[in-house]
Amino acid sequence: MTAEPLPHDELRPSSSSAVTVLFLHAFPFDRRMWRGQLGALAALEREVRAVAVDLRGFGAASSLPRVTPPSIDALAADVERTLDALGLERPIVVGLSMGGYVALALARRAQAKLGGLVLADTRAGADSEAARQGRAANVERARAGGGAAVFAAMRPNVFAHGAQPEVVDQLAAIAADQRAEGVIAALEAMRDRPDATPWLASLALPTTVVVGAEDALTPPSEAELLARAIPGARLVTIPGAGHLSNVENAPAFDEALRAAIERAG
Ligand code: MLT
């Protein structure tokens, strides 16, 4: 019996020789944060099969049961089942922030099934004690007001100076759609994630590390550490962007993505 894939949007090429890209969203959002990238890939001359999934607990995957205890590895297992169910051939996995944690966990459990990585605005390290305390405060916020309340607390640190109000509103609307249960499970999973740093040296996939120049949550200094620890990784800094670099400066992000596709494929 084939497992059910995660809910997803898909860009389908007409040729079977297309390169494949899989998008993993940040917290507390869903697959809609990648709409711009799906549009940009559709406009490329090169044929691309692209899939953007909702991770368990978010978007249309909010009805999936909670895994106990929640873990980033369990989210990666869902994604691995999705690769198999959809027949995604060695995709370039693009993960932003929480999506990057899941991408690293996926690479750790199924590196041979992947064709490359784009790790955006993310880190390999585990939560610090201060970050763990911040998770507890966000669990309380989520209980009181779901994704909207968590986003409201994150918002001052998420965007670059001068971010476009329509971009901020678009992300606020996606966050407001997320249910408390899924948001809390993700907070617990992120809080308890292991330090992936010791394993990075064994990563043998073409990897691009992307970071918003004004990312205050996973700053460029973190991205440099990540890129240095992964053999052969390239680092791309996105000007005029904070933590959500794919929506804050989509043209520059799309260019980095296009280069990563050329490199991997
Ligand atoms: C995200 O954008 O996914 C979050 O900032 C990740 C985190 O809270 O560690």
Image (spheres, rainbow, N blue to C red):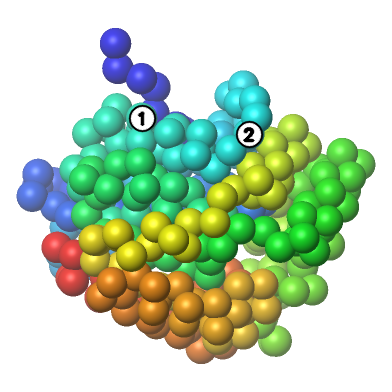
Look at the image and tell me whether residue 227 can be seen. yes
Query: Relative to the observer, which residue lies in front, 35 or 73?
Result: 73
Give amino acid for label 2: Pro
- Measured as percent of width and height from the top left, residue 215 is found at 62, 79
Marks 2 and 1 sit apart, C-alpha to C-alpha, by 17 Å
Verify CB contact (< 8 Å) between mark 2 and mark 1. no
Question: Horizontally, is 82 left or right of 168 in the view?
Answer: left
User: Residue at the spot x=54%, y=56% of the render?
Assistant: 195
Res. 81 mark: 1
Above or below: residue 41 compared with residue 191: below
Which of label 2 and label 1 is nearer to you? 2
User: Residue at the spot x=29%, y=27% of the render?
Assistant: 85
- The residue that label 2 is drawn on is 70
Res. 126 mark: none
Above or below: residue 47 compared with residue 206: above
Give amino acid for label 1: Arg
- Measured as percent of width and height from the top left, residue 145 is found at 87, 44
User: Residue at the spot x=61%, y=26% of the render?
Assistant: 67
User: Can you tell which quarter of the image residue 154 is in?
Assistant: bottom right
Above or below: residue 99 compared with residue 250: above
Q: Earlier in the sequence, mark 2 or mark 1?
A: 2
Helix, strand or loop under label 2: loop
Q: Residue furthest top?
A: 1
User: Residue at the spot x=28%, y=72% of the render?
Assistant: 231
User: Can you tell which quarter of the image residue 260 is in?
Assistant: bottom left
Q: Name the image quarter holding the C terminus.
A: bottom left
- Measured as percent of width and height from the top left, residue 220 is found at 54, 83
